[in-house]
Image: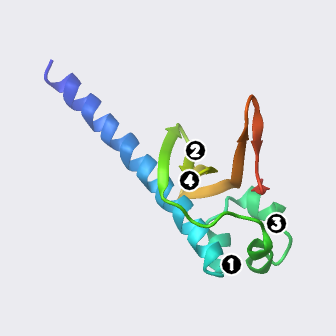
Amino acid sequence: MVLVPALLLAGCGSVQERASAAGDTATRFLEAVAGGDGEAACALLAPETEAEIDAPCAESILSEALPAPAPVTDSEVYGQRALVRLGGETVFLAVFPDGWRVVAAGCTPRGERPYDCEIEG
């Protein structure tokens, strides 16, 4: 019986670590854009999202109307996907073999309708 609570706690820690890692990736992405480092920002995009950005990505990403970095207020992990809220903005991520990547950014909620995102794949 002692083993079950220990496994539950280990699982919670894993979810918290994954949520923290997703939040860190979202923050690094927005900081790269705000700092004018298009190459670093594009390296954090999911492949399908990067494919939607006009070429060359490193230049085009800097012209997107993305929000300035703000502190992470919430980070939720759902299997291989994550939602990170930074101030009033939301970033959606997916996990890849090399870590979390941004799937959509600059997203604002629209009530019952899907989020409106500045970039998405």
Compared to residue 58, the image places residue 101 above or below, namely: above
Q: Earlier in the sequence, mark 3 or mark 1?
A: 1
Residue located beneath label 2 in the image: 83
Q: Which amino acid type is marked by label 3?
A: Ile
Q: Residues within 10 Å of mark 1 (few under 14, many from 20)?
A: many
Closest to the camera, between mark 1 and mark 4, is 4
Residue indicated by mark 4: 87
Q: Position of residue 119 (x, y in %)?
A: 77, 58
Regarding mark 3 in the picture, which secondary structure is present there? loop
Looking at the picture, tell me which residue is in the foreground, 23 or 67: 67
Q: Secondary structure at mark 2?
A: strand
Local SS, label 1: helix
**Distance from label 3 to label 1 (Cα)?**
12 Å
Residue kind at label 2, given as amino acid type = Leu
Q: Earlier in the sequence, mark 1 or mark 4?
A: 1
Q: Amino acid at mark 1?
A: Gly
Q: Nearer the viewer, mark 4 or mark 3?
A: 4
Q: Is residue 98 visible?
A: no
Q: In the image shown, does 14 or 25 lie closer to the viewer?
A: 25
- Residue 22: mark in rendering: none
Residue under pointer 1: 38
Res 29 → quadrant: bottom right
At numbered mark 4, what does the secondary structure look like: helix, strand or loop? loop
Which residue sits at x=56%, y=42%? 80
The residue furthest left is 2
Q: Residues within 10 Å of mark 3 (few under 14, many from 20)?
A: some
Q: How far apart, in angstroms, are the residues tagged by discs 4 and 3?
A: 24 Å
The answer to whether residue 60 shows anywhere in this view is yes
Disc sitting over residue 53 in the figure: 3
Q: Earlier in the sequence, mark 3 or mark 2?
A: 3
User: Label 1, label 4: how many angstroms apart (C-alpha)?
Assistant: 22 Å
Q: Residue at point 50% right, 53% down?
A: 22
